[in-house]
Amino acid sequence: MVTNPEPPQFGGKPGEPVPEVDPEDLKEVWKTTRDNRQTGFGAAAAAQRDKSQAILEATGYRASLLSAIQQLAPEKLAKFTKDGELQDCVFRAAAKAPMEWIGEGPRPGLPFDVQEFLKLCA
């Protein structure tokens, strides 16, 4: 019998907490992602060459989830945006908000509490 190997892991195991990251690192990855149109992990690696693999993955992951909020519910971030740019409070909240790694397949909602994230932004 042939078994399918498990897919490679990116980040932690599904359901485990994502490490907090430095808000300035997250902001740098966000800008690199936006300016260069790179994905979260590629931007994290480019922007933070001296960081550990775990922090690179957590920063890229958090940046991708921030991007998801901005695309799926831009009105939620509107009051934290000035001249088309996210304010620093958003990066502080996204860097620290409790969230978990997701696995493959469909998932109901985002892997963090959006209302709690918005409270942290304020």
Image (cartoon, helix red, strand yellow):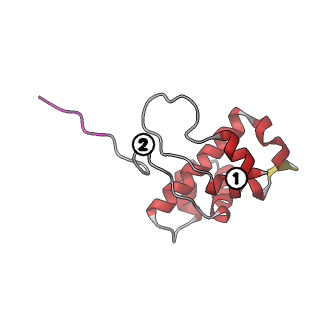
Residue tagged by mark 1?
A: 35
| Residue 19 appears left or right of 29 | left
**Which is nearer the eye, 14 or 41?**
14
User: Looking at the image, which residue sits at the far left?
Assistant: 1
**Which is nearer the eye, 34 or 65?**
65
Residue 18: mark in rendering: none
Q: Quadrant of the N terminus?
A: top left
Which portion, as a residue range, is magenta?
1-6
Q: Which residue is depicted at the point 75% across and 51% down?
A: 121
Q: CA distance from mark 1 to mark 2?
A: 30 Å
| Residue 34 appears left or right of 50 | right
Determine if the magenta segment contains residue 79: no
Considering only order in the chain, which callout, 2 or 1, is on the residue closer to the N terminus? 2
Give the total of numbered labels: 2
Q: Amino acid at mark 1?
A: Asp
Q: Amino acid at mark 2?
A: Pro
Image position, residue 36 (x, y; %): 65, 52
| Residue 2 appears left or right of 106 | left
Tell me the SS state at disc 1.
helix
Tell me the SS state at disc 2.
loop
Image position, residue 26 (x, y; %): 64, 58
